[in-house]
Image: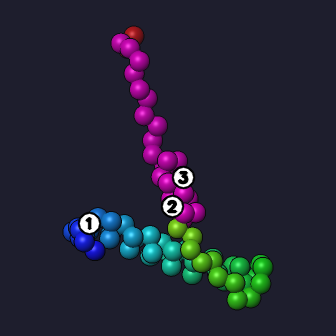
Amino acid sequence: MKHPRSINLDQVDAQQARRMLDRIVGYKLSPLLWRKVRKGLSAGRVQSVTVKLICDREKRSRPLIRLSTGPSA
């Protein structure tokens, strides 16, 4: 508290996005857990898994870029 700093709005936005991902994915997964495992379970915080799934999907959807290692023939 002796040396306050300004609020980094990019970090605030990133945290809010993670929270929304948690809610969206958690609301979708919890009913599945109820059916498959046990009634009343919650998917809880799922942001790490969600971010990995999104990154994996993004990597697959991007076209491969061929890097040139020398002059083309």
Can you give x and y, in whole percent of width and height, for residue 32 in the image? 69, 79
Front one among 11 and 50? 11
Residue type at mark 1 is Asn
Task: Indicate left or right for 25 with 9 as reference.
Answer: right
Residue 61 visible within the image:
yes
Front one among 10 and 61? 10
Instruction: Establish if 55 lies above or below 34.
Output: above
Residue type at mark 2 is Val
Q: Residue at x 42, y 34 (%)?
A: 65
Assess whether residue 67 is covered by the magenta stretch. yes
**First to last magenta residue range:** 48-71
Assess whether residue 43 is covered by the magenta stretch. no
Quarter of the figure with residue 73: top left
The colour scheme used here is rainbow
* Disc 2 element: helix
Which disc, if any, is residue 61? none
Nearer the observer: mark 3 or 2; the answer is 2
Can you give x and y, in whole percent of width and height, for residue 31 in the image? 66, 83
Q: Which residue is mark 3?
A: 56
* Disc 3 element: helix
Gap in angstroms between the C-alphas marked 3 and 2: 9 Å
Which disc, if any, is residue 8? 1
Gap in angstroms between the C-alphas marked 1 and 2: 21 Å
> Which residue appears farthest toward the top when viewing the image?
73
Residue type at mark 3 is Asp
Q: Which residue is mark 2?
A: 51
Contact, mark 3 vs mark 2 (Cβ under 8 Å): no
* Quadrant of the snapshot with the N terminus: bottom left
Mark 1 or mark 3, earlier in chain? 1
